Amino acid sequence: MRKAFFTFIFLGFVFVTVSAQENQDSTQREGVFDQLFDFGDMVINVISGEKWAVIPALIYSPETSLGVGARAIRVFRPEKGNMSVLRPSTLPITLIYTLNNQTIFTTELDLWLNENKDFINSRIELSNFPFYFFGIGNDPLPKEEGELYGNRYVYFHANYLRRIGKGIYIGPRYEFRADDIYNRVEGGVLETSKVPGYDGQLLSGIGLNLNYDTRDNIFQPTKGWYNRLAWMGFTPVLGSNFTFNQYTLDFRKYFKTFGNQVLALQSWWSFTTGGPTFQHISLIGGSDRMRGFFEGRFRDNHAQVQQAEYRIPIYRNLGLVVFGHAGQVAREVGEFNMRRMRYGAGFGFRYKINKEGLNIRLDIAFGDQTAFYFGLNEVI
């Protein structure tokens, strides 16, 4: 971890030094830079039609290794309503195959209606996703001893939110997930521990979301809040074969600092009660929470993550971000303490692909491993 930290500082120093030298030679190089960015913009325009942008999908993360496929995304506003007020809606469709023999199909609709008074979100995911299990707790198996298991699953959720006050939205949520674990290590951790969900799961539940959203832009906010309080309850009454509740608190704040630079902060908490499955228990790691830690390496009844990201425009559509985070999991809420925190940091680059602010992102993170992430849109 210390080595990763100093590597991060060194790379930052190199970037600043190179930037200073480029400023001295800016007059000579301006033409070259503009030609490169003109070419990048031309490529984006070629793959982006009037309604759909279709791009080859290239992803990389520790959980998937290298993944290739195709991604289509439509950013639009319904014809009805005040175009100057209505937030952009999105419909991405993604098909990926990874070097870890994982096949992933996802599509998700974010639909803003009625001058932002109504919001509809739904997601479908179909995956054949071999993955690793490290056990339960804040001190799981060493990462070299993670146990591979085969898993196929289908996932669906649907939300509806209605604005009831300035920036305040409330509405119901439904979730469904079915997992088929078709391959386990004989006599391994999953078989011997028999944690809930070790031989598959069928989940069906309803819940409630309460959001406070005052962001000035949903893709690239420079000010405002995005806070979410959520409850999900899974019960046999709705067809679930496991019974548990999950509560999520997600607080985000955006500050515009110098020029167009932005500081984004997030405090995320998850609390699970009842008999949750290991697939759906509170967990940290991955590309959204605690980059640099394998997704699900740390999982337990409760989890918390604190994240900060600083965003700096560099030139035209290119930007730089630096980020840091800390988090932990616990069986009981009273076990949370500073000594149990896991820490990570990193930096990345952004390239804006449309006027709404949608970004392609590349992140390099240092946690309990050095990890690379390539994808769309911001993390926080």
Image (spheres, helix red, strand yellow):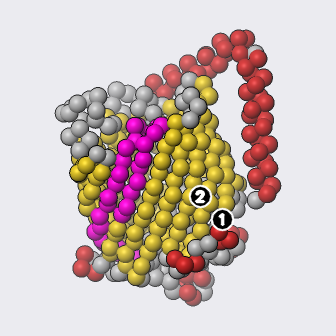
Residue annotated with mark 1: 342
Task: Give residue 27's position: percent from left, percent from top.
Answer: 71, 11
Mark 1, residues whose alpha carbon is within 10 Å: few (<14), some, or many (≥20)? some
Q: Secondary structure at mark 1?
A: strand
Q: Mark number for residue 221?
A: none
The answer to the question of whether label 1 and label 2 lie on touching residues, with beta carbons closer than 8 A, is yes
Q: CA distance from mark 1 to mark 2?
A: 9 Å
Q: Amino acid at mark 2?
A: Met
Q: Quick check: is 212 in the magenta stretch?
A: yes
Circle 2 Cα neighbour tier, 10 Å, few/some/many (<14 / 14–19 / ≥20): many
- Give me the residue at 55% from left, 78% from top: 334
Q: Amino acid at mark 1?
A: Arg
- The spot of residue 335 in percent (x, y) is 58, 78
User: Where residue 337 sits: x, y (%)?
Assistant: 62, 72
For residue 275, which quarter of the picture?
A: bottom left
Q: Position of residue 286 (x, y in %)?
A: 56, 58
Residue stretch in magenta: 201-230
> Toward the viewer: 137 or 369?
137
For the stretch drawn in magenta, what is the main secondary structure? strand
Q: Report the residue at 54% width, 30% height from top.
A: 260
Residue 85 colored in magenta in the image: no
Residue at the image point whose x is 56% and y is 35% from the top: 257
Q: Which mark is residue 290?
A: 2
